[in-house]
Image (cartoon, helix red, strand yellow):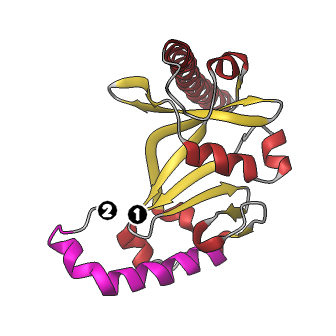
Amino acid sequence: MKNLKSIITVLLAVFSTCIFAQTTANNGIREAAIKGKSDLAKILSENKEFNFGVSAREVEASQITNPIESFYTNFERLLNDNSGNINSISGSDQKFIVPFSIDNQVITTISVVSDSKGTKAVELVNQQYKTELNQLPAEIRRANYRGLKFIRVPNIEASLYIFEDKCYTSYKGGNLREGISISEMTRKLQIDAREFQTKFGEELKRGKLVR
């Protein structure tokens, strides 16, 4: 019984440490995004000629939503994948997309990088993210994007949004409002990746193409 209590105590300590670390990281991302929001509002208010598709007043009135972690697919692993799961062959970009919304409508996003060098905003406006996030199903938007992941696939330039067991993408004319299974999407991407490799693999090796 004494050993069991010791084990439980250790597990609780580890769990508490993990929660504290996660909370601290999330707070850092949020703080960097809020600082970016302030910088963007100032830029827009002082430079009326800039047209980023959003006004300083909208930025100031917007509310921060949940950060969306960005992932990057390993292209070589995609070529040879047998798992049928794009998640298992993708690693963190150490970047988070933070949407700012008014009445459940994204008016801009701020990208934040969080790595060993610190946490900071690196991109104040991205029209792609703004447009695509506003096209996702209502239940994802109502949840303020909690649980949503963004995955980018190099070379074939695919952008994916993963929510629960579904994938949403505009890749090759896909409909962002209608999800498909992750396994089906992974198979489609693998076919395109192998076609790309057949056409451009040698040029990639010689460094003539940028991944």
Please determine whether, in this image, residue 183 is positioned above or below residue 149: below
Three-letter amino acid code at the position of disc 1:
Pro
Q: Main secondary structure of the magenta part?
A: helix
Q: Which residues are magenta?
A: 184-208
**Residue found at x 61% / y 30%:** 15
Looking at marks 2 and 1 on the same chain, the residue that comes earlier in the sequence is marked by 1
Which quarter of the figure has residue 22? top right
For mark 2, what is the residue? 211
Q: Is residue 193 left or right of residue 70?
A: left
Quadrant in which the N terminus appears: top right
Which sits in the foreground, 73 or 109?
A: 109
**Residue found at x 27% / y 62%:** 210
Residue 168 on image: x %, y %: 69, 62
Whether the magenta-drawn stretch holds residue 82 is answered as: no
Which sits in the foreground, 128 or 84?
A: 128
Quadrant in which the C terminus appears: bottom left
Q: How many marks?
A: 2
